[in-house]
Structure formats: structure tokens, C-alpha cells
Image: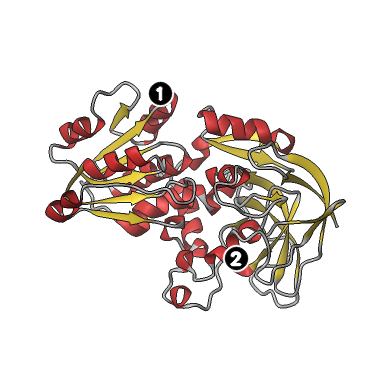
């Protein structure tokens, strides 16, 4: 079938809206009509080739839509079902069998290789094949082919205009707090970088009962939104003399937990240095391949601190995405306040607004 898609043909160049051919779903695949799709920092990073996924390429990995058709081996969903698309896993490796699919041994192969695991692509243009299957979806398109492991069936009442970002960015931030850090009520948590991932972490800290929730950013409008969503304190790193000292002054002993979403090495160092004894820093930022961080080894040894990386918020999407939607219905996790909506044709403007801080979570409207 013919689809309209946003294609990356050169590193750091704008997306091009093109007409492509999309193959019919295979026996184990699902064809989804995309209603909306979030733009994640990972999409922008791969467009810029921080992670060298082969070009030309169709990105997009926070798709939401309606199932159009299914292969004969698919049992999870059927045509007409509302779905959100997340990351893919093999469902059979050691990590998947442990209930930790975000660390699937085939994660790279199934999410960021640019093709299906067998090396094929379902997308074709006038000049030849176009790489796709990004996060087993490539949902910067009017239709996408997905698989069962990354397709989450939604309640018929779900709002397809807002749920797409739950598939990655919001899931990553919230899951890091609720699934990995698991802060006790009354503890303190600092978020460095309050974009969509950071604000999701902040809202999750409020759900968990943290009583000191500190937001650190360079953009004052984002800090104001952080305060609205539950931050008890905000720090503008552009004007603060000593961010670490300010955090220690607020908490009295350092923070129990910190979350870095920036991938800026100097900021990661602050996220570690601000911790209390036995504190934990979770790093979520996506930077260029080979980026290294430096910390004082004695600060880890003598203070018992931990630095941990987290992928996809340690979330099992079929369980965690409905939990976030339920928290939203209760008014405790208002992720819709992060969203700015753009027409699909305005994808490059939406990316610019995300990079400048004008938009927290751009969502493209296709229907």
C-alpha cells in the first residue's frame, strides 16, 4: 500500500515528506493506521546520526492508532483495536524470561538496526528500499507495521491524541522512578533536565510520595511547568552559583535519588555529587556514542553511592502503559500537560521547538 512518511536521507538535515510503498504485514505482523505519534529526543538524535542507523530511514517510535490488519499468527489484537506502540523484544531470551524485556538480548536488532531481524525492510521508495522497522514500527508515517511484543492494546475509550508518548519517553521517565528507583514516601529526588522524560519522572516521584522533589533546568518556562506538576523546589542552572550546594541546602543532607536526562557529562557529575549517603543516580540521557562520564571514585566508595543506567524505565509496556493511563484518569499523572500538537507536515518545526525548549513533548497529528 502507499503511505506518506517522513524520511531522513542525510544526517542533521530536515525530514522529507515522501510517498512510499509499505509491504503487507507478514504472518506475525500488525498493520496500524497511525493517528498520532510523539517525537522523542531519540528520533532527533538518530536523525543527526548520534547513533548510526543506516539511511535513508523512517523514524518514529511513539505511535498510537488503530489496527488495520493482522497476520494469521497474531492473536493479541484484531482489526479495529486501539493500540499504542512501544519498544520490541524477542520474548524468549534470558532477560525476557526474567520479565525484563527492556534489556532483551536482541534489543538493538529489533529496535535500532533499521530493518527487521532478518535484514529486510517493509518500506520502498522511488530510489529503492528505505530503512525502517525503527523500534519495530517506524511510525512517522500514515501506516506502520509492528509486531505483538511492541503493540499494547488499549481500552476503546483511550484518547489516541495523547497516548503515543507513553510508548517511550513518558514511560522511560516514570518507569525509572516507579520501577527502578522505587523511592520511599518522604524521600527526596532531583531531576536534571525537565523535558518530557524528566517531567514524567517528576510526576512519578509525586505519585511515589517523595516530599522534596527538585527540578533543575536552564529554561524557566519548563521550571514553572515542573512546579505546577509537583516540584517542591526549582533551580535554574543558568543563574545558580552552585547547583550541588543548593540541592544539599534544600535537602539538608543531599538527595536520596537523582535522575539525569541531559546526557551532558558535567550535569551527570552534578547528579552524582548532589547525592546523600547511599544515594542513587539514574542516567537516562541519550548522547553521542562513546560519551564517557567521570566521577570521583572515593565519592562512590566512601558514600556508598550508585550510578545506574535505565532503558525504557524498566517497563513491561503491556502492564505499565495501562497503569499510567489509570493514574492519569485519577488526576495523579497529567501527561497531557506536556503535549503540544502539530500537523504531520510540520514535523521539522516540531523538532526545532523540541530542541529549543519551546515544546516539551511534540505530538504529530496524522488523522
Label 1's element? helix
Given residues 14 and 149, the one toward you in this image is 14
Across and down, in percent, residue 5 comes to 76, 47
Which of pointers 2 and 1 indicates the residue nearer the eye?
2
Count of picture labels: 2
Q: Residues within 10 Å of mark 2 (few under 14, many from 20)?
A: many
Instruction: State which tag comes first along the sequence, 2 or 1.
Output: 2
Which residue occupies 74% across, 35% down?
Answer: 345
- Which residue: 71% across, 39% down? 15
- Position of the N terminus by quadrant: bottom right
Mark 1: few, some, or many residues within 10 Å (few <14, many ≥20)?
some
Q: Nearer the viewer, residue 159 or 58?
A: 58
Vertical position of residue 332 compared to residue 21: above or below: above
Residue 272 visible from this viewpoint: yes
Lateral position of residue 199 relative to residue 276, left or right? right
User: Of the numbered discs in the image, which one, if any, rests on residue 220?
Assistant: 1
Give the image location of residue 90, x and y in percent.
56, 73
Q: Which mark is residue 74?
A: none
Looking at the rendered structure, which numbered label has been put on residue 110?
A: 2
- Image-quadrant location for residue 310: bottom left
Of residue 303 and residue 364, the one placed in the foreground of this image is 303
Q: Position of residue 78 (x, y in %)?
A: 71, 67
Amino acid at each position: 500500500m502507499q503511505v506518506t512518511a517522513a524520511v531522513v536521507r542525510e544526517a542533521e538535515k530536515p525530514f522529507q515528506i515522501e510517498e512510499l510503498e509499505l509491504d503487507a504485514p507478514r504472518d506475525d505482523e500488525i498493520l496500524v493506521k497511525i493517528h498520532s505519534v510523539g517525537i522523542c529526543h531519540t528520533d532527533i538524535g538518530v536523525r543527526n546520526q548520534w547513533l548510526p542507523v543506516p539511511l535513508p530511514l523512517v523514524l518514529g517510535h511513539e505511535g498510537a492508532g488503530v489496527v488495520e490488519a493482522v497476520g494469521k499468527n497474531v492473536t493479541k489484537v484484531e482489526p479495529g483495536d486501539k493500540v499504542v506502540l512501544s519498544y520490541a523484544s524477542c520474548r524468549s531470551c534470558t532477560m525476557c524470561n526474567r520479565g525484563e524485556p527492556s534489556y532483551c538480548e536482541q534489543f538493538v536488532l529489533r529496535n535500532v538496526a533499521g530493518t527487521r531481524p532478518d535484514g529486510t525492510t517493509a518500506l520502498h521508495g522511488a530510489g529503492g528500499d528505505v530503512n525502517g522497522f525503527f523500534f519495530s514500527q517506524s511510525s512517522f508515517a500514515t501506516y506502520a507495521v509492528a509486531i505483538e511484543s511492541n503493540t499494547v492494546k488499549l481500552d476503546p475509550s483511550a484518547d489516541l491524541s495523547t497516548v503515543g508518548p507513553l510508548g517511550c519517553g513518558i514511560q522511560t521517565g516514570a518507569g525509572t522512578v516507579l520501577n527502578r528507583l522505587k523511592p520511599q514516601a518522604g524521600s527526596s529526588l532531583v531531576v536534571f533536565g525537565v523535558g518530557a522524560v524528566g517531567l514524567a519522572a517528576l510526576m512519578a516521584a509525586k505519585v511515589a510520595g517523595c516530599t522534596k522533589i527538585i527540578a533543575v533546568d536552564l529554561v524557566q518556562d519548563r521550571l514553572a511547568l515542573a512546579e505546577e506538576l509537583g516540584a517542591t523546589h526549582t533551580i535554574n542552572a543558568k543563574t545558580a552559583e552552585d547547583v550541588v550546594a543548593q540541592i544539599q541546602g534544600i535537602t539538608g543532607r543531599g538527595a536520596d535519588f537523582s535522575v539525569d536526562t541531559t546526557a551532558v557529562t558535567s550535569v551527570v557529575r552534578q547528579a552524582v555529587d548532589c547525592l546523600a549517603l547511599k544515594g542513587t543516580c539514574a542516567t537516562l540521557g541519550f548522547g553521542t556514542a562513546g560519551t564517557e562520564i567521570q566521577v570521583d571514585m572515593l565519592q562512590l566508595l566512601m558514600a556508598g553511592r550508585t550510578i545506574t543506567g535505565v532503558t525504557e524505565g524498566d517497563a513491561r509496556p503491556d502492564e505499565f502503559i495501562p497503569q499510567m493511563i489509570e493514574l492519569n484518569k485519577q488526576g495523579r499523572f497529567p501527561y497531557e500537560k506536556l503535549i503540544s500538537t502539530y500537523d504531520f507536515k510540520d514535523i521539522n518545526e516540531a523538532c526545532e521547538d523540541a530542541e529549543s525548549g519551546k515544546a516539551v513533548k511534540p505530538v504529530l497529528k496524522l488523522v
